[in-house]
Structures are given as C-alpha cells and as structure tokens.
Amino acid sequence: MTLQKARLNGVDLAYRIDGEAEKPWLILSNSIATDHGVWAPQIEALARSFRVVRYDTRGHGASSAPPGPYGFGDLAGDVVALMDHLGIAQSTFVGISLGGMTALGLALDHPNRFDRFVCADARADAPDAYKQIWPPNIDTARAKGMAALVEPTLQRWFSEGFRADPSSHQVLSDAATMISRTSVEGYAGCANALMSLDFLPRLHTISVPSLFIVGEHDPAAPVAVMKDMSATTPGSSFTVIENAAHLANLEQPDAFNAALLGWLEA
C-alpha cells in the first residue's frame, strides 16, 4: 500500500500498510530523526505473518510537525487514534529508540489495546547525563539545520566497524537522508519528550507480554540499563544483538529479525 495520511489529534499522520488483510495487526514505531523507512529490513519477514502498519511519528517523515514540545502522552495518543482510524481493536507493537519508549507508554496507559510489545534500544528514564544531550542538539538544529546533526548522530547509532565497512554505505546514506529531512520542530518536540521520560518507576505494573532488545554496543540505551528494565517488567524476555549499536535493526537486520520473529512466533 502507498503512503497515506490521516488527520489525527491535530497532526497529519502518515502511515503505510503491508501484508494480507486476514493477518493479525503489528505496528512499528520509528526512532527520533528517522521515519517509517527505518523498518525496511524487517518488512518482508514480518509481512509474511502480520498485517504491518508503519507510521511516521509526529514531526517526522511525511507526518506534520505541530508546535512542540511533545510528551509521550501525545505520541501514545497518536498511535491509539491511528488504531481507531484503521479499526484496529488490538495489535502487537514494536518500537525502537523513541518508538520503544512509546511502546512503554502504550503498555502502561493503554494495555487493553495491545497483546504484546517489543521495546528495542530504548530507555525508561532520563538521568541528567541523558537530558544534557538534547538542548545542544536542539540549538544546533535550529541554528544550522538537521544536516549538522547527521555525522554525530550516525556515530551514536552505528558501531565504528560498521561505519568503516564499505558494504554499509547504503544503510548509512539512507539513515543520513532520514536525519537531514526530519523537521527541526519535530525533532525538538520529540527531544523534549525524551527529556521528560519517567516510565522506570512504573515498569513493575506492566501486564502486557514484552520483549526487550538491545544492541551490544548501544551507548544511548546500554545493555545493563535495558537488562534492568526487563528484570523490572513482569514476565518479560531480554535479548542482546551482538555487534550492533543503537539502531540494531539496521546494523544487524538478520539477527534482529531472528530475535524478533522467534519471540513473536513462540
């Protein structure tokens, strides 16, 4: 299906659907400074078993960017509104980075709408060192445009070995394009949501079956942090993707797909 838009919560939310109508629903949520294209390596495998909805988080991709700041209540509310628009009573939800945090918010505040969720390469809190990342990035984006954030962002998203490998050129190029075309207002709005992140004290109340996935070398959501998140979340599973940093689904797509589908189909 081609990219479509729906006016929801004051946002023109862009989305795309893959897979057959009779399959169970699965929704994919992107990281900050990407769009639904971040899930390209997963679509062929997922669409065999699911009807997959990819959407551009508000302020990203082809979705509109209302004035910020945004909060996770806004981001989760957009997902629920999109589900209502599409007639989805219940779905599996998979998010990476910002999308993984959105997954936590949905599991906490809208548990009846989801049968399972996957939180990949994401935090549940915003300690001071994490909060301090975002104001300088916002200032840079406002002063110089998103292109100025491409190189430092790629350094955090992908391991040094991956960035040095000539065979990674297309993945890095595609990621750079997504970063540079992100709305500055959308980036700033979602960065403010990240600075307000405070789900950690509530993880023990989550009742939805969950999987936590993390790249072995993720600097933003380290293995130890995500392992503790999983340990706090009742009945959750935990998987580490070797030789991957923050966007593990792009750096090691085969291993990520195997971990994801292995859990979803178990």
Image (tube, rainbow, N blue to C red):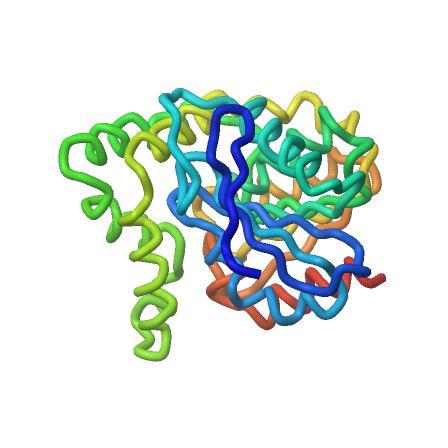
Number of numbered callouts drawn: 0
Give the image location of residue 110, x and y in percent: 74, 28
Tell me where residue 30 appears, x and y as whole percent. 51, 47
Question: Outermost residue, left direction?
Answer: 144
Residue 38 vertical position relative to residue 7 in the rendered view, above or below: below
Say which residue appears at 56% left-offset and 54% top-offset. Answer: 16
Front in this rendered view, residue 225 or 80? 80
Relative horizontal placement of residue 135, taking residue 47 as reference (left or right): left
Front residue of this view, candidates 205 and 13? 13
Q: Is residue 95 above or below residue 48?
A: above
Please say whether residue 222 is visible from this viewpoint.
no
* Residue 162 horizontal/vertical position (percent): 38, 68
Q: Is residue 120 left or right of residue 107?
A: left
Residue at x 79%, y 25% (from the top left corner): 205
Can I make out residue 181 in this image?
Answer: yes
Q: Quadrant of the N terminus?
A: bottom right
**On the rendered image, what quadrant is the C terminus found in?**
bottom right
Which quadrant would residue 264 be assigned to in this image? Answer: bottom right
Decide if residue 30 is on the left or right side of residue 203: left
Above or below, comparing residue 266 to residue 81 in the picture: below
Going by the picture, which residue comes out furthest to the bottom?
Answer: 167
x then y, percent, for residue 7: 52, 32
Residue at (76% x, 60% y) in the render: 21
| Residue in the picture at 28% in, 35% down | 184
Near-viewer residue (146 or 181)? 181
